[in-house]
Amino acid sequence: MRSEFDLLKERVSLLEKELRHKQLTISSIHEIGKALSSELKIDRLLPLIMDEVTRLINAERSTFYVVDHERGEIWSKIAQKAEINEIRLPIGKGIAGHVAKTGEVVNIKDAYSDPRFDPSTDKKTGYRTRSVLCMPIFEPVRSQKTKPKILAVIQALNKIDGAFTREDEELMASLASQIAISLVNSQLYDSLEKKVKELNLLYDIEQDASYTEKEEILYRRLIKKLVQTFQTQAGLIAFFDKSSNRFGPFFSFNIPADQIKKLNPAHNIGIEGYVLDKNKIYITNAAPDDPLYQQNPPDSLKFKIRQILCAPLKVNGHPAGIIQLFNKTNPNEIFRKEDERILSSVSRQLSRMIEARRLREEKIKAERLAAIGNMLSTIVHDLRTPMNNIYGFVDLLSEEDDPEMRKEFSGIIIQQIQMLNNMAHDILDFAKGKTNILPVKTPVNKLLDTFKKTFENEIKRKGFELEIVNNAPCMLYIDPDKILRVFMNIMKNALEAMEKGGTFSIVAREVGDEVEFQLKDTGKGIPENIRSRLFESFVTSGKKEGTGLGLAIVKNLIDQHKGRIEVESTPGKGTTFKIYFKKR
């Protein structure tokens, strides 16, 4: 019969053993807790956790399964000491699949005697499973009304010293609650990383759109960026022409040009037709079995298509095209709701970008047409002066009997016809930014006499006075026809600015090594709001027939002569243009 001392000694030994176990448990939980609090990347966190679980539970190995509800699978993140790195099972298959489906804790002594056990993994690895402890990991409860979601499953195999106990279950449950918090934090971290990646993608698209003028380069860059971001095998942007009901042009990445040329997606059937018609994103992760895919498979694409993510492009409420991504590069991955959400944001941004570009192109075309209209208006407006002169001198010619006067009138008519031709060339050269002057040595008095003979009759006929004073008996190296055009443009502005009876004057004088021409009117002056922009194209003070090109051409012609022009204007008193050329 055992003595009380022996019983007490045995009891102390059991308590010491239990104390060591508790110390080991507390130490392991402490180590796991430190890992949970210091690591957000689940890939780096789980190996440590599973090592500690295996040691704490005193099992041969442990496996951690992530529950993929979207795919309907569980897959092993860590398989310790196993010959395969990844195990994938449908939810509901095997003991781990059963736990993922039901949320039950399973503790069995003999795996092969349990009908839920799937021995296929043992057959692949050569491992012999005996005892199993399998437990779900639930997301932390947010509300009593909401059923918690199963995030993962922990499975320990083959208790080294017998079967798994109730104490092991409680210990694993304690670890599972800590791991659940870590998983949620890791998911939030992953979600934040994806959001940052999405924002970076949208920012990059916006930047490319802002700094890339050529559409072909822009769209090829965009589809390459999408393929890399979504980690797919290939991608395609296909525009849709509603007038012809055909797709094109195409911009692709990782698809050979000869395959693109033969591509002929339909607008009313298949995945492309569905996306265009419904204006909805379409995902298939089993393309060959998909009924929409089977309606119009892209046979010209020579690679095997497993998965497709297709998003619509819509501009001004009308179908504008599609974005298609083909096959995740990781064969075990699929297109997910997260991919759909991000591509939806991209397609909306790209649609807005296309719409903005088209509106800008339409605006540019409209502005070009308006510029052409203004230019034509300027030509017609400017042609009136020499045409009126031609008409007047032809009339005088018909009534003149003096041969010398007829000869002079004929010369003026020929000069005016030449001016018509030169004016047309001046405007076209101005529009093209060309320089086209033919400078010759010209006396100042001859330049002013020609202007007076040509325009004095018209000025007086319109009810104004012309005064010309020459105090510069010298030569200039100029294109006289172009300078007459300068004087004529300023004169026309002056006549439009004055009341009947006003005076337009030209005074020439020598100032150092330059000749200064003062062209002055007695009009109402130049409005302050346009004075600083007076020589810009299409700037006008609202004159009835003004086009805003006259003074821009004046400035251009003076610049070509390496001269300069200044303007002084007093409201209600008139305007003076001062033009300077070097003497010769």
Image: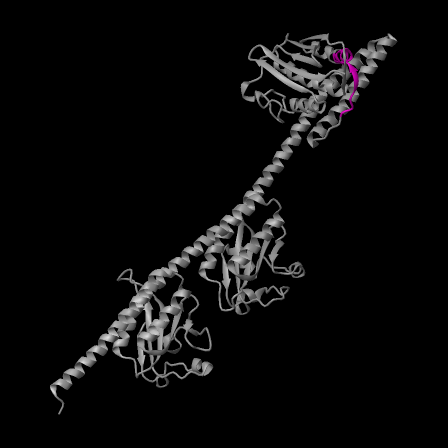
Q: x and y percent of residue 257 in the render?
A: 66, 59
What residue occupies the far left of the structure in this picture? 4
Q: x and y percent of residue 488 in the render?
A: 70, 17
Q: Is residue 389 above or below residue 538?
A: above
Q: Nearer the viewer, residue 543 or 584?
A: 584
Residue interval drawn in magenta: 437-451
What residue lies at 26% left-to-right and 62% top-to-bottom?
144
Q: Is residue 194 above or below residue 453?
A: below
> On the picture, is 10 further left or further right than 387?
left
What residue lies at 58% left-to-right and 24% top-to-bottom?
533
Residue 100 visible to the viewer? no
> On the picture, is 471 further left or further right than 191?
right
> On the picture, is 530 further left or further right than 165?
right
Q: x and y percent of residue 538 in the render?
A: 62, 26
Q: How is the image coloured?
A: one colour
Q: Nearer the viewer, residue 159 or 280?
A: 159
Residue 32 visible to the viewer? yes
